[in-house]
Each structure stands twice: as structure tokens, then as C-alpha cells.
Amino acid sequence: MDKIEQLAKWIAGSDNIVFFGGAGVSTESGIPDFRSVDGLYNQKYDYPPETILSHTFYRHYPEEFFRFYQDKMLCLDAKPNAAHLKLAQWEKEGKLKAVITQNIDGLHQAAGSKKVLELHGSVLRNYCEGCGRFFDAEYMLHADGVPKCDACGSSVKPDVVLYEEGLDDKTLRDAINYIRNADVLIIGGTSLVVYPAAGLIDYYRGNKLVLVNKTATARDTSADLVVQGSIGEIFAAL
């Protein structure tokens, strides 16, 4: 039995699947991965992305932060790919319990997924730091310089987890619960190097741990099934 057949068999026999995904799920929708070799390094910016997307940088150099943010983080024309759509289908069929994602693009919800735990927040939510008023991503994209609240004049901050900021406690707890109780855990599009998110795999207690990624990961040896290739193509074949 080949690997995709094996995965299809496990999926067919389970109604307690949890999916944990990273940047590789979004890159197939055309969203760049700033950590990849051909990612966003040295493209008209004086600092690496990890520095720009830090809490300290946001506070000290808001103009430069938002120049990068508008240019590289707001990919509002992106559409869900085959992986997003398949996960939404499994949820609708009662097979998938939750999607846990490190991505901030909202594409899982756009595909129809209802139970999505966003570990790193979402570019689709933005809040005034003064009065708490909500602003959508279009407002942020078209703002001139630092986005300001049109009610109180304070800065509007994206609801994304920047470097140096902690993950939301409830989201993290819920993610741990879903992973701990999953029958099949599918991890896709992540090299499992970004903590604390990468550590979530350690809470899984089952014997159907599946890693789907274009390249090898540090955790391949602990997986029950490793499928290498495009996650969109692999999920479309299931």
C-alpha cells in the first residue's frame, strides 16, 4: 500500500482527525513564506523579517513596520487551495474536529472551516489601541503610514502575535486538548522549528501521526507516516 493510500485509509476510518498546519499550507495559495530561502530577506528592507515583526520594532519603528506589513503580510487576493478545501470538507463530514494553524491569513475560514484555532492571530482582525474599535484588513492595506483610528486617533494594531509576544492562553490550551485527544493527527506544511507551536506535537498520544511536507522535518523519525510533496496535490488525491 502506498503512502497516500495508507493516509486515505486512516482518514476513512476516523471521526477524530486534527490538522496542524504551517506556512506551507498558505504558500500554495501564493502567500510568501518569509522564512524560506527565497522568502522575503533583503528585499528593500534594512532588517530581517523576524526583527521587523517583533513587538520591540513595532513600538520603536511603526512606520517601517507597517511598510513591511502592508507590502508583505496582507495578501488579500489569495484564495484557498485544495488543502484548505479538503479540510473544510472533512469537517463538514464530521471527520475533522479542528484545524490548528500558525497562519494568519484566514484562508481556512474562507474555505468553509468552522473550528479553526489561530495560534498566531489573523490579519483580518485589527483593533485600535486606544478605544478597542475593530478595523478590517482593507483599512490596514490602504492606510497611509501608520494606521490610525478615525474615532480616537490612536494607532490600530493587527491582531497577530509578533515575535516577543506570547500566544493566547485559551487558544493554546484548546489546541493541546484537541491534539491530546485526536485519533489521527496530520501535520502539514511546517518544518516544526518554530516554538512554542512546534512543541504541540508532543501532546499527541495516538499511533497515527502523519507528517505532510515538501521537505524532511526534524520530527520525521517520530511520525507513523511521512508523505513528502505538495500538500495541495496530496490532499486533492485523498
Image (tube, rainbow, N blue to C red):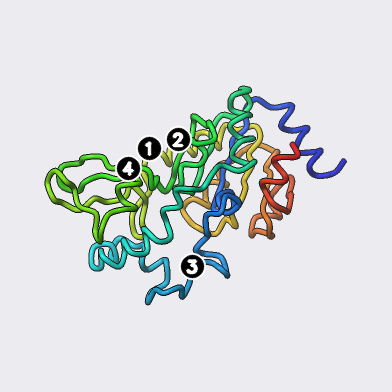
The reply to whether dot 1 and dot 2 touch (C-beta < 8 Å) is yes
Residue 235, percent from left and from top? 69, 41
Label 3: few (<14), some or many (≥20) within 10 Å? some
Q: Which mark identifies residue 136?
A: 4
Q: Cα distance, mark 4 to mark 2?
A: 26 Å
Instruction: Look at mark 3 in the image and give the residue it sits on.
Output: 40
Residue type, mark 4 in image: Asp
Mark 4 or 2, which is nearer the eye? 4
Q: Give the residue drawn at x 36%, y 44%.
A: 168
Q: Secondary structure at mark 1?
A: helix
Q: Cα distance, mark 2 to mark 3?
A: 32 Å
Q: Which mark identifies residue 191?
A: none
Q: Earlier in the sequence, mark 4 or mark 1?
A: 4
Label 1: few (<14), some or many (≥20) within 10 Å? few
Residue 37 is left or right of residue 74, and the answer is right
Instruction: Look at mark 1 in the image and give the residue it sits on.
Output: 170
Query: 89 or 80, which is in the foreground?
Result: 80
